Image (cartoon, rainbow, N blue to C red):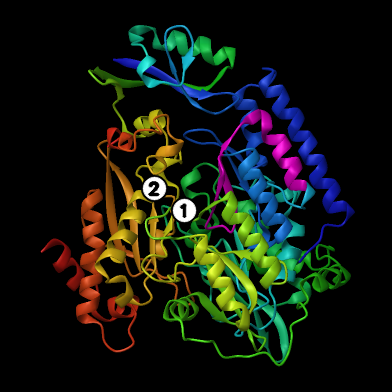
Amino acid sequence: MKILTGNDLESGAVVWWDGQDWSIHVNEAVDVGEDAAAILAREEASRRVNVPYAIEAERDKNGVRPAHIKDRVRALGPTVRPDLTLKPADPDAGNWVI
Amino acid sequence: MYKYDQYDQAMVDARVEEFRDQARRRIEGKLTEDQFKPLRLMNGLYLQLHAYMLRVAIPYGTLSSSQMHTLADIADKYDRGYGHFTTRQNIQYNWIKLEEAADLLADLAKVEMHAIQTSGNCIRNISSDHFAGAAADELIDPRPYAELLRQWSSFHPEFSYLPRKFKIAVIASDTDRAAMRLHDIGIQIVEKNGEIGAAFYVGGGMGRTPMIAPQIRDFVPLDQLVTYSEACLRVYNRHGRRDNKYKARIKILVHEMGAEEYTSQVEEEFAHLLDQGVEPPLAELERIKPFFDDPAFETGLTTEIDRSDPDFALWADRNTHPHKAPGYVSAVISLKPVGGIPGDATTAQMHLMADLSKQYSFDESRVMHTQNIVLPHVKIADLHALWTALNEAGLGEPNLDQVGDIIACPGLDYCSLANARSIPIAQQISERFAANGKGDTLGELKLKISGCINACGHHHAGHIGILGVDKKGTESYQLLLGGSEAEDTSLAKITGPGFDEAGIVDAVETAADVYLAQKQDGERFLDTYRRIGMAPFKEALYG
């Protein structure tokens, strides 16, 4: 699947296109298929998100998993500080990145 | 410690308000990201993986306790309770909100600090020996000259848009504690025929094309220091490549032009500039110098360390440095606890270091390029009390220049340029050597890790270096051996094919084992490597 990501203008937080808006949760990312370029152009023009781009990902029983490790780190947070990630209660969450 | 005058303060305050307006216009949508990006970068505000990152300048690494307290307050107020001290003697915050960035800068300005020129193709924060003004082996305190260069380079209109970023280090000792020859310009204050002057080394650096700077002048009179620097920059600004950012640093120019030709052009420019009034009046240098006068050192102090507590004695042996005043030492606070994140300090730790600097070190601390903190002037009689306080806060690791004292860039956990994570490798290596007990047998061993070819973790200069690379979407780590950033500067060489995460930790231990098996009396890891060469290490690593 192809999903869209970027960074929120005000907080810099990593965000994912959920079909209507930008979410901080990668599992809410939707497959944009052939619409990637059009959505990116529209959203970049609205200036709510910085440097959005399309990436490859796959959806399995655990949710959406970006293809590249960099985007998996972006989706979770720093693997060396579980307390600062989106899953602070799960100290093993970093293993999902690898 | 240098104190801003009305011009310094007015410039910094004005820049804060200018940036406040720029950020407001960006948030209101009146500026695009393409328009805003160069403006925020001029104020040290990057956009990294998870948030905006702000890099704060700490000129020559020197901090008062009130400045350190403010850095802690900022970590609490605008970030997530910690800061990251870097290899440029700066501090970085990782979780900044754009709408709060101007308020943060205003708080910094209240303690005479800023983030100007911590990004961009300009002259960056001037770095220096972290023991400056304290070291027993120093000719003079180099910081007044670093401060003069800071004033010259800040807002310099001609050098605001160089071909690439530009880094200057100033030292005044034959022992290089600032990686001087791995800077764009390295300046060593020297004495010649009874006169104090400066030797210039130009064209060093790490990154994708590491170079050791050649000396281009063995003596520049101190009243021509700025003029000669300006000549070096002018020739670079004229000929540096702007068509290819990977070939734009001055090291490439000096290498391709040849040091002799580059020097010739610098000398010609220098001769031209000498009567152009570039040099600040000597009165300005004389105004600056008293800010760096020695504090009121006491006399008649004990020079003996009470070694009855072996844990304290170990820390004192490893983490202190000889001081020019009898009865004092410089004490290094390790930001490298076993399994910790190199360079990170919590709000509470920063407040404590500020308090301890006030109590024990004449209100002063220093950021080291090795990502530790120094209290430069500590009475030997106070060392045990200082160590006790540090230990209780997790800051008493006795590992200066040991295998656990690892430099590591933020890597892929934070940095948008990185290809691989650095911090977890550092954590695993320090844990491995603490657990197997080998760390205590290795002596001086400088280990440096970068998560990409830009070399923020100085892997080229590590006795053991590690470079993280992207191998078809997975992390891979190259091992390098034989680098040094000290006065015996050398560039590390790659051993061979890379390793995965577990493999690189094993590989470091294997290299350490080769050293332990081969070392002769008094040899450091680096000495043994230089004596026996790469082959025994390759044999052990790859068979």
Q: Is residue B135 visible?
A: no
Q: Residues within 10 Å of mark 1 (few under 14, many from 20)?
A: many
> Residue flagged by tag 1: what amino acid is it?
Cys
| Element type where label 1 sits in the image | loop
Q: Which residue is mark 2?
A: B452
Residue B210 on image: x %, y %: 43, 59
- In the rendered image, residue B17, in percent from the top left (x then y), is placed at 80, 35
Position of B528 relative to B100 (above/below): below
> CB of mark 2 within 8 Å of CB of mark 1?
yes
Q: Position of residue B507 (x, y in %)?
A: 22, 61
- In the picture of the structure, the residue carrying the numbered disc 1 is B456
Closer to the camera, A56 or B345? B345
Q: Amino acid at mark 2?
A: Cys
Specify the farthest residue to the left.
B543
Disc 2 residue crowd, few under 14, some 14–19, many 20+, Cα 10 Å: many
Residue placed at 58% from the left, 12% from the top?
Answer: A46
Identify the magenta region. B80-109
- Look at the image and tell me in which quarter the N terminus of chain A lies: top left
Q: Chain of mark 2?
A: B
From the viewer's side, name the closer residue of B125 and B442.
B442
The correct choice, above or below, for B310 with respect to B19 in the image is below
Q: Residue at x 48, y 15 (%)?
A: A22
Task: Find residue B261 and report its image quarter.
Answer: bottom right
Q: Provide the chain ID for the residue under circle 1.
A: B
Q: For residue B167, what is the image quadrant?
A: bottom right
**Foreground pick, A70 / B356:** B356
B11 left or right, relative to B307: right
Compared across the picture, whether B256 is left or right of B60 comes to left
**Image coords of residue B115 (percent x, y):** 67, 46
**In the image, B532: left or right of B277?**
left
In the image, residue A19 sits, relative to residue A7, either above or below, namely above
